[in-house]
Structures are given as structure tokens and as C-alpha cells.
Image (cartoon, helix red, strand yellow):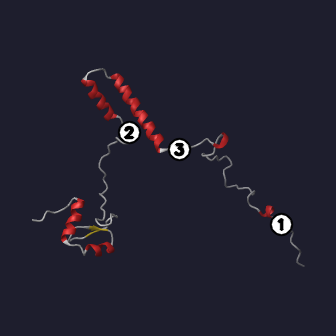
């Protein structure tokens, strides 16, 4: 009573051509959109960005220079205009409200702990074992590198 099943080909079993109702038929990939596949989002190299920024600053300075007329006062105004140009490198920000990060004096990794006896900062127990073997002169040298060296008299 078992009937032989019909033979199916690989193309009939393939899901590649099956409809996908969950995909948006109007979606366009922005990197390949447009004729020839070249439209959409463009990225610029760092050199291009820096060159464009320099051109923008130069144009602003040239406009300021044309407004200013002769004399030593003009040079001072030109310098002031240069300092007023806002660019990525000239933006001044207030100090951070977050606490300053502390780094291990031995490894340079972020320090989670501080030795109360020597006040050296360390990353983990393995570094602490090394730190315990240091002579006072070595400890003073590490503190001096950090800028907290104590002058012993």
C-alpha cells in the first residue's frame, strides 16, 4: 500500500526563488542605489575632509582679510579672526564632569586598586605581587613619573 513518491529536482526544492512576504519590495540599498549602482551614501577619506576644512578656514580668513584695511591694527584683527574660526580642532570644551580615569603605574592598564602604603596604583593581584617587591627608591621613581614624587630629606 505504499505509493512511490514523485522525484523532486533540486530547483523545485530550492528556497531561493520562494516569495518573501517579510521583505519590503520598495527597499533600495543606499550604497548601490541609482543608475550604474554608484549612487547613495558617499564616504570621504580623512585627507579629503582635512583639505575641505583647510579650504573653508582659508576662505573665511580671506573674507575677513578683505574686510580689514591696512595698518598694524589690521594684523591684530586678522589674528583675532583666525582664533574665532570654529573648526574641529579649535572647539574648546568645558572640563568633564566624570571622574578622571586612573591608570596602573606599572602596566598602564586601568587601575582598579591603590596600595595604601606606597600609593602606587595597580591593575590586579598579579601586579600587586610585583609591586610588593619594589624598594622605596623604585616606588619614588614610579611616583615621580606620575608627577606625585615625594622629596625625602
Whole-percent x, y for residue 3 in the image = 89, 75
Q: Residue furthest bottom?
A: 1
Among the two numbered marks 1 and 2 on one chain, the one whose residue lies closer to the N terminus: 1
Q: Quadrant of the C terminus?
A: bottom left
- Mark 3 to mark 1 CA distance (whole Å): 48 Å
Label 1 SS: loop
Q: Considering depth in this image, is 21 or 27 the residue closer to the camera?
A: 27
Label 3 SS: loop
Q: Judge left or right: residue 116 versus residue 29.
A: left
At horizontal 29% and vertical 49% (from top left) the residue drawn is: 95
Q: Considering depth in this image, is 43 or 10 the residue closer to the camera?
A: 43
Q: Which residue is mark 1?
A: 8
Among the two numbered marks 3 and 1 on one chain, the one whose residue lies closer to the N terminus: 1
Image height of 142 relative to 74, above or below: below
Q: Which residue is mark 3?
A: 43
Structural crowding at the residue carrying mark 2, measured as other residues with C-alpha within 10 Å and reported as few (<14), some (14–19) or many (≥20): few
Q: Judge left or right: residue 121 versus residue 39.
A: left
Q: Quadrant of the N terminus?
A: bottom right
At horizontal 36% and vertical 37% (from top left) the residue drawn is: 86
Residue 52 occupies quadrant: top left
Q: Which residue is mark 2?
A: 87
Disc 2, disc 3: CB below 8 Å?
Answer: no
- Mark 2 to mark 3 CA distance (whole Å): 20 Å
Label 2 SS: loop
Among the two numbered marks 2 and 3 on one chain, the one whose residue lies closer to the N terminus: 3
Please tell me the numbered disc located at residue 126.
none
Whole-percent x, y for residue 81 in the image = 32, 31
- Mark 1 to mark 2 CA distance (whole Å): 66 Å
Q: Nearer the viewer, mark 3 or mark 1?
A: 3
At horizontal 35% and vertical 34% (from top left) the residue drawn is: 85
Amino acid at each position: 500500500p505504499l505509493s512511490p513518491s514523485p522525484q523532486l529536482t533540486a530547483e523545485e526544492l530550492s528556497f531561493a526563488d520562494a516569495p518573501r512576504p517579510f521583505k519590503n519590495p520598495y527597499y533600495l540599498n543606499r550604497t548601490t542605489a541609482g543608475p550604474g549602482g554608484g549612487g547613495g551614501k558617499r564616504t570621504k577619506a580623512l585627507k579629503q575632509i582635512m583639505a575641505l576644512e583647510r579650504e573653508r578656514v582659508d576662505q573665511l580668513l580671506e573674507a575677513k582679510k578683505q574686510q580689514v584695511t591696512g595698518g598694524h591694527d589690521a594684523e591684530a584683527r586678522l589674528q583675532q579672526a583666525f582664533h574665532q574660526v570654529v573648526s574641529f580642532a579649535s572647539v574648546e570644551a568645558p572640563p568633564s564632569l566624570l571622574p578622571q580615569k586612573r591608570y596602573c603605574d606599572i602596566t598602564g592598564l586601568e587601575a582598579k586598586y591603590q596600595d595604601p602604603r606606597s600609593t602606587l596604583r595597580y591593575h590586579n593581584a598579579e601586579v600587586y605581587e610585583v609591586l610588593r617587591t619594589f624598594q622605596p627608591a623604585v616606588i619614588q621613581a614610579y611616583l615621580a613619573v606620575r608627577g606625585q614624587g615625594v622629596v625625602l630629606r
